[in-house]
């Protein structure tokens, strides 16, 4: 997600798009609102056996959630049957809107553009796989995950501003600090599932694209690009020369 003032995107994005014959996404953004995906989300996001967040969270954490909803004039009853991962993502979406972060991100921007332009598209994983990763990331650590998420929501403006500055400037160390380092330290299992394992699965596919005669633009979240386990360093370790596009 971005703010309206974050557009137009840095010129390097448009240059890369114009040079590409195929656009590759993490997953196909066009499938997100399909009936199949909405059914999957409804099935995975909610408790269907009468369980509520009050049953899952420790009393102190549940109080923090209550207080957050009260400060934001939100009805806790709207979230009570959501699993912690989906509840956190929903609260994040609401908080982003409060801060004016309502514009689609880079992937959605170029998805819509590629549809209009009739550009060929491909994906590194299915939308079902991506939803499985997202919905299951708090499993077994629900309380800690919710506490961490609520703390991040209280610092969202600071975090998001710093991330946008780092992203526009291509500051890889700052991006890693803001996106992956804290997560890796506090939730190494989630970091492994969301970043390390997926990067490893994508790497041979990306190498395959490098070997084709066509030029592909591969769009993934910045957290997948930075750090020792990021895609850029993985490619370098395998002997590829990786250069930052700067115009």
Image: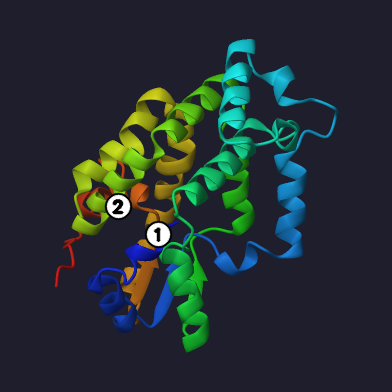
Residue depicted at x 49% and y 38%: 193
The residues tagged by marks 2 and 1 sit, at their Cα atoms, a distance apart of 10 Å
Task: Report which quarter residue 12 is drawn in.
Answer: bottom left
Q: Are marks 2 and 1 in contact (CB under 8 Å)?
A: yes
Residue 164, labelled with which disc?
2
Say which of 52 and 65 sits in front.
Answer: 65
Compare residues 236 and 78 and report the one nearer the observer: 78
Q: Looking at the image, which residue is at 64% across and 54% down? A: 128
Q: Residue furthest bottom?
A: 117
Q: Is residue 110 left or right of residue 246?
A: right
The answer to whether one can see residue 140 in this image is no
Q: Earlier in the sequence, mark 2 or mark 1?
A: 1
Question: What element does badge 1 sit on?
Answer: loop
Residue at position x 30%, y 47% from top? 161
Q: Residue furthest right?
A: 49
Report which residue position mark 1 lands on: 3
Residue 31 placement (x, y as % from top left): 64, 66
In the rendered view, tell whether residue 223 sits above or below residue 103.
above
The picture quadrant where one finds residue 240 is bottom left
Residues 80 and 182: in front is 80
Q: Is residue 132 above or below residue 35?
A: above
Report the number of numbered marks. 2
Percent coordinates x, y for residue 123 in the rendering: 51, 66
* Residue 242 placement, left or right of 4: left
Looking at the picture, how far across and down is residue 20, in whole percent?
34, 80
- Quarter holding the C terminus is bottom left
* Rendered location of residue 63, percent (x, y): 61, 17
Residue 147 visible in the current orientation:
yes
Residue 190 image label: none
- Residue pushed farthest top? 59
- The local crowd at label 1, few if under 14, some if 14 to 19, many if 20 or more residues have their Cα within 10 Å, is some
Q: Quadrant of the N terminus?
A: bottom left
């Amino acid at each position: 997600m971005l703010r309206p003032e974050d557009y137009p995107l840095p010129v390097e994005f448009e240059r890369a798009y114009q040079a590409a014959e195929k656009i590759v996404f993490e997953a196909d953004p066009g499938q997100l609102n399909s009936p199949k995906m909405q059914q999957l989300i409804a099935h995975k996001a909610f408790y269907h056996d009468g369980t509520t967040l009050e049953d899952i969270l420790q009393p102190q954490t549940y109080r923090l959630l209550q207080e957050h909803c009260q400060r934001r004039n939100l009805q806790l009853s709207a979230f009570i049957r959501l699993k912690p991962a989906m509840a956190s993502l929903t609260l994040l979406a609401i908080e982003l809107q409060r801060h004016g972060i309502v514009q689609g991100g880079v992937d959605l921007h170029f998805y819509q553009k590629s549809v209009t332009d009739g550009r060929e598209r491909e994906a590194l994983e299915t939308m079902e796989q991506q939803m499985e990763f997202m919905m299951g990331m708090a499993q077994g650590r629900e309380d800690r995950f919710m506490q961490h998420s609520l703390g991040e929501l209280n610092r969202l403006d600071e975090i998001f501003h710093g991330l946008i500055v780092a992203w526009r400037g291509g500051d890889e160390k700052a991006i890693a600090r803001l996106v992956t380092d804290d997560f890796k330290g506090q939730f190494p299992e989630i970091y492994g599932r969301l970043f390390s394992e997926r990067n490893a699965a994508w790497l041979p596919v990306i190498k395959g694209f490098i070997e084709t005669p066509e030029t592909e633009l591969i769009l993934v979240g910045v957290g997948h690009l930075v750090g020792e386990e990021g895609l850029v360093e993985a490619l370098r370790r395998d002997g590829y020369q990786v250069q930052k596009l700067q115009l």
